[in-house]
Image (cartoon, rainbow, N blue to C red):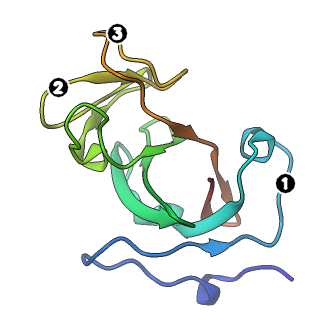
């Protein structure tokens, strides 16, 4: 069984949506994690250079599509003060929380400024869907 776009709700400007378990896990970074894959939306739901909040299983996640096309996913709330990480600024190396400007490395979730690290989740595109493992 494969998922089609009709199997996934189209996001709105309302609350974060619930992911649907993916039926196929391909090789690659997302397949390496210990979590369960969830389809949270479509790649085009996240404009290049921005992030969006989703729900994957029981986890709130922030998914980013960088300008180079790469995808990243992290916990939705900043560990420092609960800021909405999906609203943060990002580049190829770091994500910056919009509340107090704490930066977190995409490579390992640590903060150059010494803040508690963020949890990173494997994420990938599968047939236009965003698949996040939690």
Q: CA distance from mark 2 to mark 3?
A: 11 Å
- Residue 22 in sight in this render: yes
User: Front-most of 82 and 51?
Assistant: 82
At a point 53% along the width and 37% down the height, the residue shown is 120
Q: CA distance from mark 3 to mark 1?
A: 33 Å
Report the mark closest to the observer, 3 or 1. 3
The quadrant of the image that shows the N terminus is bottom right
From the top left corner, tell me how far across and down residue 10 is, in percent.
44, 82
Q: Is disc 3 surrounded by few (<14), some (14 to 19) or many (20+) residues within 10 Å? A: few
Is 106 above or below relative to 74? above
Give the number of callouts: 3
Q: Which mark is residue 3?
A: none
Q: Is residue 42 left or right of residue 81?
A: right
* Pointer 2 or 3: first along the chain: 2
Q: Is disc 1 surrounded by few (<14), some (14 to 19) or many (20+) residues within 10 Å? A: few
* Pointer 3 or 1: first along the chain: 1
Q: Quadrant of residue 92?
A: top left
Q: Quadrant of residue 115?
A: top left
- Which element is circle 3 on? loop
At a point 25% along the width and 39% down the height, the residue shown is 88
* Pointer 2 or 1: first along the chain: 1
From the top left corner, tell me how far across and down residue 43 is, in percent.
52, 61
Is 36 above or below relative to 89? below
Q: Dot 2 corresponds to which residue?
A: 101
At a point 31% along the width and 46% down the height, the residue shown is 77
Q: Dot 3 corresponds to which residue?
A: 112
Q: Dot 1 corresponds to which residue?
A: 26
- Which element is circle 1 on? loop
Report the mark closest to the observer, 2 or 1. 2
């Amino acid at each position: 069984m494969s998922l089609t776009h009709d199997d996934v709700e189209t996001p709105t400007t309302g609350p974060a949506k619930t992911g649907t378990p993916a039926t196929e896990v391909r090789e690659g970074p997302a397949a390496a994690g210990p979590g369960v894959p969830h389809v949270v939306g479509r790649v085009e739901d996240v404009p290049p250079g921005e992030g969006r909040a989703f729900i994957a299983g029981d986890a709130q996640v922030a998914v980013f599509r960088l300008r180079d096309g790469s995808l990243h996913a992290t916990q939705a709330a900043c560990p420092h003060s609960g800021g909405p990480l999906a609203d943060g600024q990002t580049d190829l190396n770091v994500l910056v929380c919009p509340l107090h400007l704490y930066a977190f490395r995409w490579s390992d979730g640590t903060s150059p400024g010494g803040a508690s690290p963020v949890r990173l989740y494997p994420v990938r595109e599968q047939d236009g869907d965003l698949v996040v493992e939690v």
